[in-house]
Image (cartoon, helix red, strand yellow):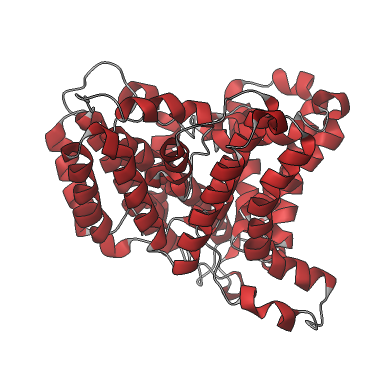
Amino acid sequence: MNFNTAEFLLLFLPVQVILFYVVRPRFRLFILLLGSIFFYGMSSDIAGFLLVNTILWAGGIGYISSKMIHNSGWLTLAIFPPFLLLFLFKYLDFTLTAVDPNDQLRSSFQFILKYALPAGISFYTFQIASYLIDVHDGKVEREKNPLVFAVFAAFFPQLIAGPILRFHELRDQLRFIAAERNLRPDFPRAFKFISVGLAYKIFLADVLRRFQETHDVSAGGGSLDAAYAVLAYSFIIYFDFWAYSLMAIGLAKLFCIELPRNFLEPYKSTSPREFWRRWHVTLSFWLRDYVYLKIGGNTAYIRNIAIVFLACGLWHGAGWNFLIWGGYHALLVIAHHLAREPWGRLPGFVQITITFMFVSLGWPLFYNGIEEYGALISVLFAFQAPTDTAQFGYGDWLYLAIPALIVFATREDRWLFNENYNRFLDSPLFHAGLTGLSLMFLNFGRTFIYFQF
């Protein structure tokens, strides 16, 4: 089920909110869990089955005797099944293609390969794994209430595309809503984040995606068309993912739960390293804490950065293009590390511009194969003049300027996450109108890009 559908916004969500507030406090977590499983199960039966069984396994093994929790064998046993399922449903096809190009082994695994990738499986697998690792390391206590753990693992606002939460971020909040009689939800701010996220998704990510997908390198058009395709997708993937994260924050607020920001205006970063502290923040810090630091951290900086970013590439998708994308970002971070002194002497706006351009050049690997990507980059840097076959005109470039202005000319702390009330931007009437306008254009809606991860 998508956030940007009438079924979710006008049916599922109102029913879920009403049930949550009419039941007694001790039943609230059950309502959240039931709604979350229904929400996820709507994508496919196998997806719901995998989620429920992963929660049962992790919750059950996390409840065992404390004498075994700090045993390394216990940790291996605990995290092996979730990661095995992730491998089978996400990476098996890629692995078979890599080791057996003739497909002789493929027929033996058709019973798994016939299923589509369960939406968001990487997100909830990493989230559940972080709980098991933190229990093993003594950073959190075993959760004795199975409903608290189950809702942490399946909470529908962030289930499919994050943010990737740590157990301590939700534990006390979930216990509170299960005990407090008089909850005080921040409905105005919840509505604000939902409406802005929905508008970002419809009018910036999805409409711009319709324009960008018309680009065909083989049809000509010159370097300017290639530049439009690269820049447009850079804004598409940002506003698509940020839209989901914003709506997740707003949806969680409806149930008195605070989720962390997953994006900190990343395109204003002054270096590739800073970019990864501001883009998909919860994934970056997950990889830092559970991969980078575990393999030695700064003791072997270049090697460990390469490992982390190759893992980051594979997390995003099973394909050589994603591995290359991860390696590309590793090179950017390492190059910045080696040249950080001369880099630091550049004016700030130059650092931001160069960082944005290098990041943008990598994004087409998300939707192109290696050959297609190479062709796109070749046309881009051929510096060909516009031709009669140009696919993007003045109107397309003018529309592209809208997300660019939002990204570079505004500050979210002043208008989106502002503490002081703004009569216009915080007005319920404004956000009601924005939501209504978005609902009118739901037919432009696409599935969120990060659902495939």
Q: Nearer the viewer, residue 255 or 329?
A: 255
Give left or right: position of 274 versus 197: right
Q: Quadrant of residue 43?
A: bottom left
Q: Nearer the viewer, residue 426 or 408?
A: 426
Residue drawn 34% across the image and 21% down it: 414
Q: Is residue 128 above or below residue 226?
A: above
Residue drawn 24% across the image and 60% down it: 7
Give left or right: position of 335 versus 206: right
Residue 112 in percent (x, y) is at 63, 73
Residue drawn 40% across the image and 52% down it: 205
Give left or right: position of 298 versus 344: right
Residue 197 in percent (x, y) is at 33, 43
Q: Nearer the viewer, residue 419 or 224?
A: 419
Q: Nearer the viewer, residue 398 or 157?
A: 157
Q: Is residue 392 above or below residue 240?
A: below
Q: Is residue 55 above or below residue 196?
A: below
